[in-house]
């Protein structure tokens, strides 16, 4: 299962400026 930990890590990896991974993924397509 992908918890918020993975979500935040993926979001942070794409946009280091955005601390909130959830908001980041909401604006971008799901990364594999």
Image (cartoon, rainbow, N blue to C red):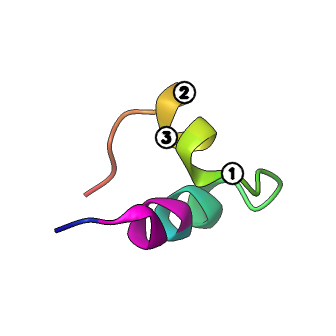
Query: How far, Cα to Cα, is label 2 from label 1?
Result: 11 Å
Spot occupied by residue 17 in the image (x, y as percentages of width and height):
83, 54
Q: Badge 3, how many Cα within 10 Å: few under 14, some, many 20+?
A: some
Q: Write the start and end of the magenta stretch as one range.
A: 3-8
- The C terminus sits in image quarter: bottom left
- Please rate how many residues cluster around mark 1, counting C-alpha atoms within 10 Å: few if below 14, some from 14 to 19, many from 20: some
> Counting residues from the N terminus, which is met first, the one under dot 2 or under dot 1?
1
Residue at (40% x, 70% y) in the render: 6
Q: Do the residues labelled 2 and 3 touch (CB within 8 Å)?
A: yes
Q: Which residue lies furthest to the top in this view?
A: 27
Locate residue 27, reporting x and y percent. 54, 27
Residue at horizontal 59 percent and vertical 67 percent from the top: 13
**Sequence order check: which comes first, mark 3 or mark 1?**
1
Residue occupying the far right of the picture: 17
Q: Mark 3 points at which residue?
A: 25
Query: Does dot 2 land on a helix, a strand or a loop?
Result: helix
**Would you call the spot at circle 2 few (<14 residues within 10 Å), some (14-19), or many (20 or more)?**
few
Q: Is residue 30 above or below residue 13?
A: above
Which mark, residue 27?
Answer: 2
Tag on residue 20?
1
Q: Is residue 32 left or right of residue 14?
A: left
Distance between mark 2 and mark 3 Cα atoms = 5 Å
Q: What element carries label 1?
A: loop
Residue 7 x, y percent position in the rendering = 44, 60
């Amino acid at each position: 299962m992908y918890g918020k930990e993975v979500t935040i890590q993926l979001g942070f990896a794409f946009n280091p400026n955005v601390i909130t991974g959830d908001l980041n993924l909401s604006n971008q397509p799901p990364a594999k």
